[in-house]
Image (cartoon, rainbow, N blue to C red):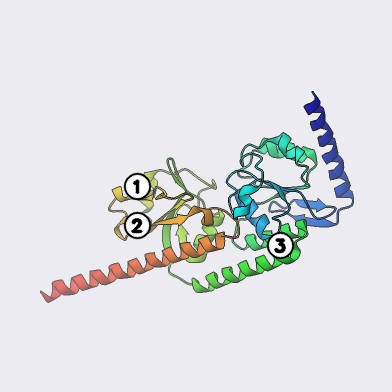
Amino acid sequence: MKKTMQTWSLLFFFSLCGMISHANAAIRVQDDYGNTVLLQKPAQRVISMSPHVTELLFAAGGSTHLVGVVSYSDYPEAAKFIPQIGDNRQIDLERVIAMKPDLIVVWLYGSSMRQVEQLQKLGIPLFYSEPHKLDDIPDSLIRLGRLLGTDKEAQQAASDLRQKLGALTKQYANRSPVRLFYQVWDKPLYTLNGQHIVSDAMRLCGGENIFSKMKVAAPSVGIEAVLQENPEAIFGSAEKSPSDGGINMWKRYPTLTAVQRGNLFLLDGNLLNRAGPRMIAGAAALCEKLEQARMNRVNRAENKTENRTEVSAK
């Protein structure tokens, strides 16, 4: 009974703070869903509800502001020592309340809608983070820096990322397209559609996602569907070592173009599957592998030409 009373008292406290914040907001920022986030002053006690959000907050200068994170928030190293409030699908709501956050950064795709709705009722300001393009990542840093009062550090980090992204864009502009299959998981077989931020990285590198037109962001597909599309390259990702990301399963299909040309590639999922600052490095790795696929295409064509020349000579 005492714990329940404390919880309701804190609920009232957060609701009152939310009303005061909206009335006298000094900071106004739009989140990735177009919602306006209003703060009376820079946030000092922040909770992250996604590993990619944790990385964004650190990069934006918010390391000392973070009071709670979800599981798998393991980068940078200091993130491992921040108290956890659950995972990105189930959080300890009472623990969140006890932490008295003045800002929660939510990843709606991975979070429980019911619990997000409960957080909304508390009156705690929520910032929804869902970058859809690589360009959105530095922009996220700037907006989060504004909410944290760490504008200078966030601006510098954003500028560095934009320079790296600009260099990649210039380096891989006008490259010949490579049709590819991006394998998120093998059992069951999952991929990503063209609206996902990973597909934006593919486009930057000259890659064409064979399932870009799927309506679901992370659809399940069958092996036969992949074989029918016959991609030139197949990518898997692994977040833990050792792992092959499940891509070796395709070696059972020797007529597949990706197998014939040796284009089964493994990427670091910690870089490419998290929409944080490190994703630019993940995109660079993806570009390098696609360039290798192009070289394998050229080498194969040259070998065929040499074989035909030898046969003609005989």
Q: Position of residue 150 (x, y in %)?
A: 75, 61
Determine if residue 123 is in view. Answer: yes
Residue 154 has which mark? none
Residue in front for this viewpoint, 238 or 108: 238
Q: Amino acid at mark 1?
A: Met
Is 238 situated left or right of 263 in this image? right
Residue pictured at 85% horizontal, 36% vertical: 12
Q: Amino acid at mark 3?
A: Ile
**Alpha carbons under labels 1 and 3: distance apart:** 42 Å
Is 148 situated left or right of 199 in this image? right
Query: SS for tag 2?
Result: helix
Query: SS for tag 1?
Result: helix
Location of mark 2 (residue): 258
Determine if residue 130 is in view. Answer: no
The tag earlier along the polypeptide, 1 or 3, is: 3
Residue pictured at 44% horizontal, 66% vertical: 288
Query: SS for tag 3?
Result: helix
Q: Amino acid at mark 2?
A: Ala
